[in-house]
Image: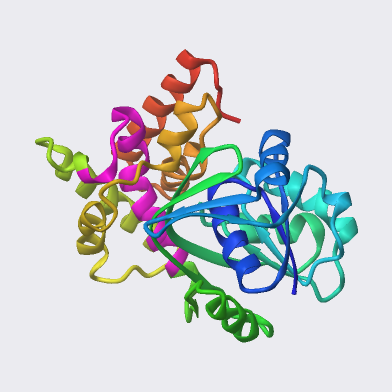
């Protein structure tokens, strides 16, 4: 397949690298510093087995790509529509777009913006950019994707590339379940600048996590989305499953970049207000992260 990865950050580089290793023609679209490093050294894939350079094409502009069979959209939620419009002239009628992003509404927003079908996806992977063109994998690496006419074939191709992929029976439930995990830990990891494994060791943190999850469940139900009974147990188990991982929000703050807090805890607070559901913990975490952004000059968008 011709694969375009829009947003060559940690998630895009990790999955793009695996697809390239599986023999697909992958082009990463990213910032100049990453493109220069990848052109010079290949994409460096850093896993428990060591560092492997992967020869892969990298460009800064979507106009430089071949019309793709598959697009992995990995940009920040605030950039969804602009990234989609930049890609639109290169799309074929049968191009498949997967939204591999945080939040619950990126696929619907992108589809409305460009008039092309978009498949929502849920990503479970721990990654970070260790340097320009250098992605480090901390754990997991599976996808859940929404149902469509192309989903089974795409899931098979991704799974063959060592990206375990399942077609979800209820993608909205899956998106909300992932959002709850992000809401529970992203802001806390960012505020403390600590990996997940260190958070619950502090007295009171578990209660904060429980409050966040309870609020998320109430808002999801108000939006007509059912949440599995084991949601709380899964949330409390995350630090043990990914102890060394810092959240994407923590990584953004460390690099002076805008975070996605408005699309995580901020979404829960906004939808809660619209439906009359109190969300004091999610609102507080949103405000604290935005205050840190303001103090550091990164500024939420």
Q: Is residue 274 left or right of residue 279?
A: right
Residue 164: x and y in percent read 47, 75
Residue drawn at 42 percent across, 47 percent down = 268
The question of residue 281 being in magenta is answered with no
Residue drawn at 55 percent across, 66 percent down = 121
Q: Quadrant of the C terminus?
A: top right
Residue 196: x and y in percent read 27, 44
Q: Which stretch appears magenta?
A: 174-197
Q: Quadrant of the N terminus?
A: bottom right
**From the viewer's perspective, is residue 23 above or below residue 33?**
below
Residue drawn at 30 percent across, 71 percent down = 228
Q: Is residue 136 left or right of residue 237?
A: right
Q: Is residue 276 left or right of residue 230?
A: right
| Among the 4 quarters of the image, the one containing residue 298 | top right
**Which is the main secondary structure of the residues drawn in magenta?**
helix
Q: Nearer the viewer, residue 294 or 70?
A: 70
| Among the 4 quarters of the image, the one containing residue 21 | bottom right
Q: Nearer the viewer, residue 215 or 132?
A: 132
**From the viewer's perspective, is residue 78 above or below residue 241?**
above
Residue 27: x and y in percent read 74, 57
**From the viewer's perspective, is residue 155 above or below residue 75?**
below
Q: Is residue 91 left or right of residue 185?
A: right
Residue 10 appears anywhere in the view: yes
- Identify the colour scheme used: rainbow
Residue 119: x and y in percent read 64, 69
Q: Across the whole image, how many numbered discs are drawn on residues?
A: 0
The question of residue 191 being in magenta is answered with yes
Residue drawn at 88 percent across, 60 percent down = 90
Residue 280 appears anywhere in the view: no
Tell which residue pokes out farthest to the left in this image.
203
Q: Nearer the viewer, residue 119 or 257?
A: 257
């Amino acid at each position: 397949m011709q694969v375009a990865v829009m947003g060559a950050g940690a998630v895009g580089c990790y999955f793009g690298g695996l697809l390239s290793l599986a023999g697909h023609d992958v082009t990463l679209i990213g910032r100049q510093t990453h493109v220069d490093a990848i052109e010079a050294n290949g994409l460096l894939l850093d896993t428990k087995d060591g560092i492997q350079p992967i020869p892969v094409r990298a460009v800064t502009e979507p106009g430089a790509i071949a019309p793709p069979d598959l697009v992995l959209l990995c940009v920040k939620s605030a950039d969804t529509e602009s990234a989609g419009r930049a890609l639109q002239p290169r799309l074929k009628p049968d191009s498949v777009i997967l939204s591999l992003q945080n939040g619950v509404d990126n696929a619907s927003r992108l589809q409305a913006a460009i008039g092309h079908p978009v498949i929502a996806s849920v990503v479970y992977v721990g990654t970070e950019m260790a340097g320009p063109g250098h992605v480090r994998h901390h754990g997991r690496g599976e996808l859940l994707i929404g149902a469509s006419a192309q989903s089974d074939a795409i899931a098979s191709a991704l799974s063959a590339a060592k990206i375990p992929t399942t077609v979800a029976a209820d993608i909205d439930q899956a998106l909300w379940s992932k959002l709850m995990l992000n809401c529970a830990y992203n802001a806390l990891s960012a505020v403390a600048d600590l990996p997940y494994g260190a958070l619950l060791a502090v007295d009171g943190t578990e209660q904060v996590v429980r409050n966040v999850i309870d609020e998320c469940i109430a808002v999801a139900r108000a939006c007509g989305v059912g949440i599995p009974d084991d949601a709380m147990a899964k949330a409390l188990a995350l630090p043990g499953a990914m102890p060394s991982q810092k959240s994407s929000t923590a990584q953004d703050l460390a690099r002076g970049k805008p975070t996605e807090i408005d699309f995580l805890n901020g979404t829960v607070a906004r939808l809660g207000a619209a439906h009359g559901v109190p969300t004091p913990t999610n609102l507080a975490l949103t405000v604290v992260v935005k205050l840190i952004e303001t103090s550091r000059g990164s500024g939420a968008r």
